[in-house]
Amino acid sequence: MSKPIHQHFIPKSYLNNFAVNDNNKNFISAKNSDNNKIITVSTRDICVGKNLYTLPSDDNKFAIEHFYADHIDSKFPELYKILTDSKIIEIDSKTKTDIIATVLSLYFRTPKFLNQENKIFEEIVRTAHKHSKGGDFIVEYGDDNIIITSNEVEQIIREYKENNRIKFLGQHLDQYERLIKSKIQNVINVYHITDESQLITSDNPVLIRPFVDPTAEDFDEDKFHKQTINPFDESNTIHLPLNDKTMLTILPNLDSFPDFKIRRLEKKKIDTIIYNNDIERYAERWILGKPSSIENHITDQSEFNTHNPVALEAMGSYKEKVIQFKELFDIIKQNGVTSNIVMQKVEFMEKLESVKNDPNIEKVIRTIKAANK
């Protein structure tokens, strides 16, 4: 069996869908979070670490890497074909499980949270060392009180980083299996971008969004983005860009019946901008994509962050249709689909430009009107 020391935490089979092929080699554009410089790199050489999943034991120390290679990465190309084929709307139980397992693997196998933990520990040690003026000092970390001499600083940092890595390896497969079980009843949507806009991805590509009611009076967008994510919250939605034109979304199932459909919806530039903003927000170091998608993302974010009239109008329209759709959903929940109050709401919404420009809401409205004939 192979000994893969060079270990991708985001598989090449995924990255290649955002890459450009040149002479049978795949190259992806990448922008570091520290600056706006865009570089081009082979998908072999990014989102990769040395011995990230290597176990300390001599017995099958590459078991985790082999698990991902055999059970996840090898299945991704076939699952990708299914998810990006707009004609496929029915899947079986095994395919659904494979889709959910593959997406969640990309959440748990990334080292972002491990690296954050290591960074915090190193900052604590170095700050305490600086204030110790060369003498011994004590660091509180978790349940430990660590006594450190001045000449032990680098060794202690290395040891705790390795201890954190081993802890990461010991916990993340168990958590991964637990999360699959908690999401297996969820429903699968695929969003297809129908205009010229392009999705990007990152070195931490899975977005987990907590449930939020944007119509609530106390909704605070800044707090929403800063809150700690609990991946096991049943109300979460999960998103993964599949390529520059396709977004996979896993949503809570509102009833207890098994669901083996892929619901396909159309999205446009305003949706792309919002998704790309979140993708960059949750990236660890790199946002990734085709050259034009990275460049357009930088331009789009700059325009929307300056709150120019076009951007303000687009965001206002987006928020309006979200609020209107939420109100329609609440009315249907209380009164059923076939009722006068539902039709009154539909007639009001049909007059709004934000609704007229959304093909997905238009489909819902047509369905409601047909039910009320």
Image (spheres, rainbow, N blue to C red):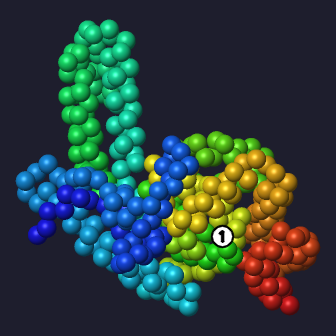
Q: Quadrant of residue 40?
A: bottom left
User: How many labels were placed on the picture?
Assistant: 1
Query: In the rendering, at what x and y percent does residue 3 appear?
Result: 14, 63
Residue 77 lies, with reference to residue 158, above or below; the image says below
- Dot 1, how many residues are within 10 Å of its Cα: few (below 14), some (14-19), or many (20+)? many
115 on left or right of 28: left
Q: Quadrant of residue 318?
A: bottom right
The outermost residue toward the front is: 23
The one nearer the camera, 176 or 246, is 246
Residue ID at (23%, 45%) = 166
Q: Amino acid at mark 1?
A: Ser
Q: Quadrant of residue 116?
A: top left
Query: In the rendering, at what x and y percent does residue 102 appear?
Result: 39, 70
The one nearer the camera, 5 or 177, is 5
Query: In the rendering, at what x and y percent does residue 368 appear?
Result: 79, 82
The one nearer the camera, 304 or 144, is 304
Mark 1 sits on what residue? 197
Rendered-image quadrant of the C terminus: bottom right
18 on left or right of 354: left
Give SS at disc 1. Answer: loop
Residue ID at (23%, 59%) = 6
Q: Is residue 12 visible?
A: yes
Query: In the rendering, at what x and y percent does residue 1 appear?
Result: 11, 69
Residue ID at (45%, 48%) = 285
